[in-house]
Image: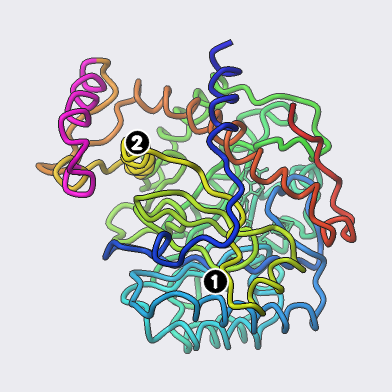
Amino acid sequence: MLISFLKHQARYKIHPEIDPLIESISAVHQDTGLYLHIPFCKHFCTFCPYHKFRYDENMLRTYTEAVFREFGLYPPREYDSLYVGGGTPTVHQGLLLELIRFFRPIIRREIGVELHPLDATGELLELMETEGVQYLSLGIQSMHDEVLRHFGRNHSARDNHRALSQVMNAGYKLVDVDLVFDLAAFSSEVVLKDFETVCAYLPHQISIYPMMRFSFAPYRTKNQPAREFETFLQIDKLALRMGYHRDMLWTYRRSGVAGRYSSVTRPFFRGIGISASSFNGEGFYVNTFDYDRYLTCIANARLPVSKRYRLSDWENALFYLFWSLYRNELNLALWCDYFPQQKARGRLLFRYLRLLGYLEPISPELWGLTQHGRKAFHRLEEWLTYAMIEPIWNDYATTPRARDSDQPQPARGP
Ligand SMILES: C[S@@+](CC[C@H](N)C(=O)[O-])C[C@H]1O[C@@H](n2cnc3c(N)ncnc32)[C@H](O)[C@@H]1O
Ligand code: SF4
């Protein structure tokens, strides 16, 4: 009942946005990261909700040109970091390197790229490093062939072993490995074994996601948050034995490692490309999912933004709080600085969350989630994915180019 009400509220917050003023969505904060979406894949995995088209070199070339022009619509400034995600950013080596070369001069810190295991060749790894990429996220998903088949992946456990060796030998500053589990199909022992196998390669970070079932994926089962949370508690113990500790909600970091692969979990971000989203502390914006509309907007020097979440100052502060807690590093003083009008309300909420036993100090300035807090947050994160991300991504159904792809079509929301 409560969830249905909140879902309704979340839908009410989404507004079509045509031709927003550049000033209204320009990034205002220093610690803003840049995210670039490359929406092309050679193979479509069954479990994947990300917006993508079947790879076509000409389409990708046109798209790359459009991305440069979209970026040029914003006032020039530096960004903290650049994360390139997708789709599959490594689908075309030359164009990826061209993009990185273009953006590198305005990036103050790390450049991170999502890497498909089948693209983890010595040649590409060397070229990316030469161009300044220091962070990689490797889409391993599982070290079991039957799990990979369940997700509709096009690589085997053997390919994953080979990719892990290649990447770990390439000397990158930070390597994240993505794992996904589905307790409706496989036991928790399977994911524990996956975690242990991956740990043996000593990546700096391991992200483990419960599989989310978007309405267009062919899974008719449901998430089981209580069982998933229990599994995370088991992983916590195993991680400590393997020299890792829980860092963010669904991420583990090797002890002694500085830095973290973190794309949209950044405080503020500007998204460039089809379906990319932006948060500047004054609103949450989503670019169009329609390929033709994206190109037309760019050709007419108009921002390709198509949706806006109508957020009040308080809701913006809550959005910021949410991601701070996801990262397990709430800096109360900084939060008050970013949202000065909400200082009194924010402090009250903070006291309330402490009273509920959700927060604990982790350093003189930072607060993190207690185990009790993590349990509540696990449910909240899943709820938000279904209540807020799914309606946005349902946009897929209305994009003509998406219909050309062989992605199963989403069911429309109620
Ligand atoms: C854009 S994809 C990865 C990049 C690259 N295309 C690849 O497949 O290796 C980003 C990550 O999202 C995660 N992911 C995809 N679908 C998911 C789902 N339904 N539920 C949870 N995580 C998912 C996977 O771990 C994946 O590595
Ligand atoms: S998970 Fe599969 S479909 Fe999704 S972006 Fe990666 S390769 Fe493409």
- In front here: 32 or 27? 27
Q: In the image, what residue occupies the spot 27% across and 57% down?
A: 256
Residue furthest to the left: 364
Q: Check disc 2 and report its element: helix, strand or loop.
A: helix
**In the image, farthest residue toward the top:** 1
Ligand 2: which quarter? bottom right
Instruction: In the rendered structure, find residue 167 and report the number of the disc placed on it.
Output: 1
List x then y, in percent, for residue 82.
Answer: 44, 71
Residue 209's place in the image compared with 162, above or below, is above
Q: Using residue 9 as the reference point, say whether residue 246 is left or right of it.
A: left
Q: Is residue 20 above or below residue 59?
A: above
| Residue in the image at 44% along x and 37% along y | 238
Q: Which mark is residue 272?
A: none
Question: Which element type, helix, strand or loop, lies under badge 1?
Answer: helix
Which secondary structure type mostly characterizes the magenta part of the structure?
Answer: helix
Which image quarter: residue 354?
A: top left
Q: CA distance from mark 2 to mark 1?
A: 37 Å
Residue 289 x, y percent position in the rendering: 70, 58
Contact (Cβ within 8 Å) of mark 2 with mark 1: no
Instruction: Tell me which label, 2 or 1, sits earlier in the chain.
Output: 1
Examine the rendering and report whether any part of residue 246 can be seen. Answer: no
In this rendering, does residue 232 appear at all? yes
Q: Is residue 372 above or below residue 68?
A: above
> Which residue is at 74% across, 31% downward?
413
Q: Nearer the viewer, residue 319 or 212?
A: 319
The residue indicated by pointer 2 is 318
Residue 340 vs 199, above or below: the answer is above
Q: Please check the rendered image and state whether residue 351 is part of the magenta-colored stretch, yes or no.
A: yes
Quadrant of the snapshot with the C terminus: top right
